[in-house]
Amino acid sequence: MMQKFMLGAYWDARADSLEKCTEDAARFLARLAEIDPLLASWYERGRSRKDALERKVDILDAQKLQGLLLAGRNRRDVDREVIDELGCKLSLWNGADEEEAEATVSIHCGAYSARIGNSVIIDLPYQSESSEWVGKASSLLALTAEVWQPNWAGIMSKKAMRERDFDGDNPFVDWMVYVPRKIASVPSPGRVEELNGLGSVVVVQPDPPVGEGHEELTRIRQVERLLPA
């Protein structure tokens, strides 16, 4: 059965400035474009598809990105003052003609409230029946780790997230997972990719999981036991 996947990265309170968030978002979006053309063009969300396609974002325009992040800040109901501790947000769509190629990216950074975390979410334009994107997936995860330095990040199917009680506070193991520490080894056919002092990307199995079968779940449970610090 075909599965849709997402990349999620999560980290705790971190009082990054608007300028730092803008710089990181610009670097992240530019590097996404190097990994896959489907992640090269981005549009603001609109009231309709037609409206959104009129709102293309120049990812090299730092002032534009900063303006979008500013627009995504939370404000108080009474006086419309910015609530600094809740950070800023940015949400974009890739404008694909076909549903199978659609992707979205959402960035929430600079939040330092104890009640809310930071995250980067990419709804990926990839499906488990396609082998073309296997080599790109770990590159996306490594890039996310490098730019945002999260508590953890993963590439996981939406089906698995629904069925196995996803919790962004803890590493969720499905296909690939990043943690900011060294993982010496994992059971075959999985592998570990070390990220030059940033930690480890664990690839649970070579091909995307289909979300069925005892063997897949066994591999996932084995990796889960290896992740705690």
Image (tube, rainbow, N blue to C red):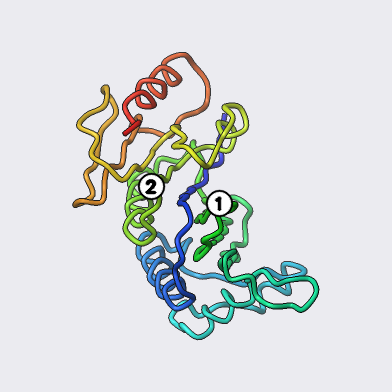
User: Where residue 137 is drawn, which disc sits there?
Assistant: 2
Q: What x and y, as percent, mark residue 14?
A: 45, 61
**Mark 2 is on which residue type?**
Ala
Residue at position x 22%, y 29% from top?
185
Secondary-structure class at tag 1: strand
180 and 128: which is toward the camera: 180
Left or right of 96? Residue 188 is left
Q: Are marks 1 and 2 in contact (CB under 8 Å)?
A: no
Left or right of 80? Residue 161 is left
49 and 160: which is toward the camera: 160
151 and 129: which is toward the camera: 151
Q: What x and y, as percent, mark residue 213?
A: 49, 16
Task: Please determine whether, in this image, residue 100 is positioned above or below residue 67.
Answer: above
Residue 108 falls in which quadrant of the image? bottom right
Residue 215 falls in which quadrant of the image? top left
Which residue lies under the disc numbered 1? Answer: 123
Left or right of 27? Residue 170 is right
How many other residues sit within 10 Å of disc 2, few (<14), some (14-19) or many (≥20)? many
121 and 198: which is toward the camera: 198
How many other residues sit within 10 Å of disc 1, few (<14), some (14-19) or many (≥20)? some
**Mark 1 is on which residue type?**
Asp
Secondary-structure class at tag 2: helix
Task: Please determine whether, in this image, residue 134 is positioned above or below residue 189.
Answer: below
Q: Where is the N terminus found, in terms of image quarters?
A: top right
Q: What x and y, as percent, mark residue 2?
A: 56, 34
For marks 1 and 2, give the CA distance. 12 Å
Residue at position x 24%, y 34% from top?
183
Q: Where is the C terminus found, in terms of image quarters?
A: top left
Q: What x and y, as percent, mark residue 63?
A: 50, 86
